[in-house]
Every structure is written in structure tokens, then in C-alpha cells.
Image: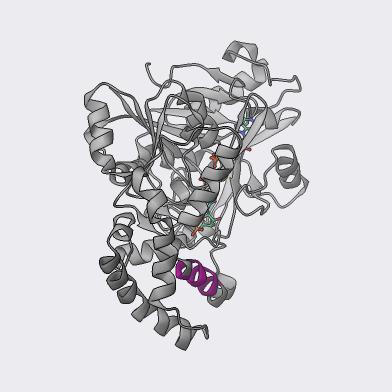
Amino acid sequence: MPAIVIVGAQWGDEGKGKATDLLGSRVDYVVKPNGGNNAGHTVVVGGEKFELKLLPAGILSPNATPVIGNGVVVNLEALFHEIDGLEARGEDTSKLRISANAHLVAPYHQTMDKVSERFLGKRAIGTTGRGIGPTYMDKVGRLGIRVQDIFDESILRQKIDGALRQKNELLVKLYNRRAITVDEIAEYFLSYAERLRPMVVDTTILLNDALDEEKVVLMEGGQATYLDVDHGTYPFVTSSNPTAGGASVGSGIGPTRINRSIGIVKAYTTRVGAGPFPTELFDEWGEYLQKTGGEFGVNTGRPRRCGWYDAVMARYATRINGFTDYFLTKLDVLTGIEQIPVCVAYEIDGVRHDEMPMSQTEFHHATPIFEHFPGWTEDISGAKTLEDLPVNAQNYVLALEKMSGTRISGIGVGPGREQTIQRYDLIED
Ligand code: GDP
Ligand code: IMO
Ligand code: MG
């Protein structure tokens, strides 16, 4: 049975949470393969709004087992805060399982995130300040602390000591901060051990056994293609691989078992944080999209930068992720715009580029070449089929489909679970 991966096709906040929630009642496991509490997914169920940061949105689907995969970086304080918040609202979180190999965010990672951003000055990334980059740095640098380490105090202390030897040099000598002790970090982690223990399993066995038993496993990527540390707009990226290949690594599900890769893409484009953005709007249209689309970050409350749809970016995302389907979200936000611009190619130093340029410098110089599509004024928020949409909205969707490299199987016409047009079944077709 299928392993399906959901991937953001732009710079995040495309509506991955809603797409996961939509499929939630039909899947058995929802695994988060990458990222940490830098994500922010808003899910609206029956008019009730939920905001998830570290937990996969699948935690709201009563039949699905939510899993935090090995590729995630876990902030334990944030984890239990989120669990307690959901439990207080009557949501059952008891099925949550966490990989023993996932890395832990330590308080010093958050400190390092903040001070290194400050030191970058004008070149700052605009991170979420959650310590995500420094935690992945320690993972790759083999100085990380993993979930399993907190169940062996002696190993835990040795590892913290190893990490702090380097960290304290930096904190004290470079950043003018106080040194951190092994005791304070060990105490911090150990205080969560008892509560964490029953949730921790070998999630690769859990998930692969589930696939052997014909169960449906959904991988819910955090962040997005253009925030991918390999394929995104480096260095203005996050420190994980939110692309489809990263989902395989971050969950321990082999690539041959993944038979569906669904790109979540907004009908326009947004970005939080710094970095290039060819179709970004600095005029009243930018403000219009921000206001109409409610484009303010869930995680940090920062306003999202807004621009028109970029088909060059979509084609690249289709290629990198091997998308089989797109789920186009927020089409309703474009209602009322007379002519809708879509970026079909870039002009870079006088030359037309139909595909993403190879270098960062070229992408920084890219100016969009727009085609304009006639808009519509009718309320589309109750549409159930493509044919329910005004003809101009249908044509807009079909034009994006043609330009973006794969079929558009679902269309979002409002934040609610039911406000969705399903052209092709995202699990069966
Ligand atoms: P994620 O991080 O990819 O899960 O996306 P976010 O939750 O950060 O941002 C997407 C926002 O758009 C959320 O507030 C959703 O409730 C909302 N949303 C999702 N799909 C649609 C849609 O089709 N129409 C409208 N109007 N809002 C949507
Ligand atoms: P979801 O899952 C949008 C951005 C940050 C910053 C960069 C690096 O909700 O789509 P980090 O804290 O990860 O080191 O920050 O990545 N970023 C996101 N932007 N949506 C997200 O998650 C993001 N997660 C990280 O704004 O530019
Ligand atoms: Mg988000």
C-alpha cells in the first residue's frame, strides 16, 4: 500500500497542514520527517482552528498514528507544551510515537541561533530563532544529543560535555555570553525522560511494518522545496531537506516504497524571512494579498512577503521532488482581481530563462516575465468541482497546470477541510 509524501513547493506556508488534515481520515500513519518547531501549520476543523508547530498535523486525525521521524529535531519543552495544549482541548495525543534517533534541541542551540543571526547583521537569514540550524549543525558535526541518549544518564553527560567544550569556547570568547554547565543541561533533558519514554520506539520498524501490512503512510514534510539546504535558495534556507528525498531519509522509508509525491502550492507566492523572491510585490497588490490571504506567520507572527505565482519555481519543484500531483491552495484569495499576473519565465541580464538559473547571483538578478490571466468576481468558496468555478478561474487553474509540470489534483477554495475541490483522488487515482 502507498507511502505518500507531502512537500511544500514554494517557501513554506502553502497549506500542507490542511492537505494532511484532508487526507487524515484515510491514512493510518502520519510521519513528520524533517524540521522542528520552526514550522507552523494552521488547520481548521469544523470551524475550530488549531495551530501546530512541532507535531505533525496528522495528530488531529483520530484514526492516524502520528510519528515524529528520525530526521526531526525535537525541542522537548515545546513538544510537551503542544501536547498539553491539545489535550486541554480534548484531543487525544496518546498514539504519538517518536524516533529514538531524532536529535534534541538544547537551550544552547536557541542561544546560538540568536547570537549567530545578530553576528550576520545585514546578511541574517531571518530564522525563526528556535535553534533549528545549530541543532542540525551538531547532528552533522557528530556532536548532537539524541532522544535515546536521555535514557542513559552517563552517556548523556558525556555527550553534553563533548558539545559544551566547543560551545562554551564560542559563547564565552566570541559571543561574550556565560559558560553553560553540564549539570544544567543534563537536568533539563532528564526532567522530561519519564514522560518521553513510552513514546519512543524504532519508528523505521513501525512504519515499514505498517507498509507491509497494506497500511497507508503519509509523510508530512515541514518547510518547503526552496527552504531545502541542498535545493533551495541557499543560504536563505532552513538546515534540513524538506524535499521528497529528505522525507525518505527522515522517516526511514526507502525511496522504492514511496509511490506518490504531492506538491502543495499556493495560487500566489509568499515567503517569511530574508532571501531572493523574483515575483515579490512592493506595491498595494502585495498588501492586498497579505491582507486577503491572512499572510502572517503562525510561528513568529511575522508578516509574510507576497508575490504572484511563479511557474518557473513550480517546474523546478516538480523536477526535484518528482511530483505526481499538485494541491493548489488559496485560489479563493485571488477572487476579485481583474487581471492575474503569472510569472512564466525570468529575464536575467537581458536573457530569457525558462528554467531556474544555475547560480545564486543569476537568481538574485531575475526579473519576472508575466502573462496576465483574466480574473473572476464570483464567490468560489463553496465550489466542489472544477466545473463549479467561473470559467476564468477554471482557465487559471488549467494554465498553471500546463506550466507547472504535473496535474493539479486538488484545489483549496477556503481554509476549511471541506472547502476543497478534488479532481483526482490523492490516494487512489
Ligand atoms: P503550512 O505551514 O504549509 O501548513 O501552511 P500554514 O498553515 O502556515 O499557512 C496556510 C494558511 O492558509 C493557513 O492559515 C490555512 O488555514 C490557510 N489555508 C489553507 N488552504 C487554504 C485555502 O484553500 N484557502 C484559504 N483562504 N486559506 C487556506
Ligand atoms: P512551514 O512548515 C515558512 C524559514 C524562516 C527562515 C528560514 C530559516 O510552516 O511551512 P530556521 O528557523 O528554519 O532556521 O529559519 O526558513 N522557515 C519557514 N518559513 N514556513 C516554515 O514552515 C518555515 N520554517 C522555516 O523564516 O527564513
Ligand atoms: Mg506554516
Q: Residue at x 64, y 22 (%)?
A: 393
Q: Position of residue 81 (x, y in %)?
A: 54, 50
Q: Which residue is at the front of the view, 200 or 321?
A: 200
Q: Position of residue 357 (x, y in %)?
A: 43, 52
Q: Is residue 382 visible?
A: yes
Q: Which residues are magenta?
A: 108-117
Q: Residue at x 34, y 71 (%)?
A: 160
Asked if residue 313 is among those painted magenta in the image, a careful observer would answer no
Q: Which residue is at the front of the view, 309 or 85?
A: 85
Q: Position of residue 234 (x, y in %)?
A: 44, 59
Q: Position of residue 391 (x, y in %)?
A: 65, 15
Q: How is the image coloured?
A: one colour
Q: Is residue 142 visible?
A: no
Asked if residue 116 is among those painted magenta in the image, a careful observer would answer yes
Q: Is residue 164 left or right of residue 326?
A: left
Q: Residue at x 34, y 42 (%)?
A: 247
Question: Residue extending furthest bottom?
Answer: 173
Main SS class of the magenta portion in the image: helix
Q: On the rendered image, what quadrant is the N terminus found in?
A: top left
Q: Which residue is at the front of the view, 185 or 254?
A: 185
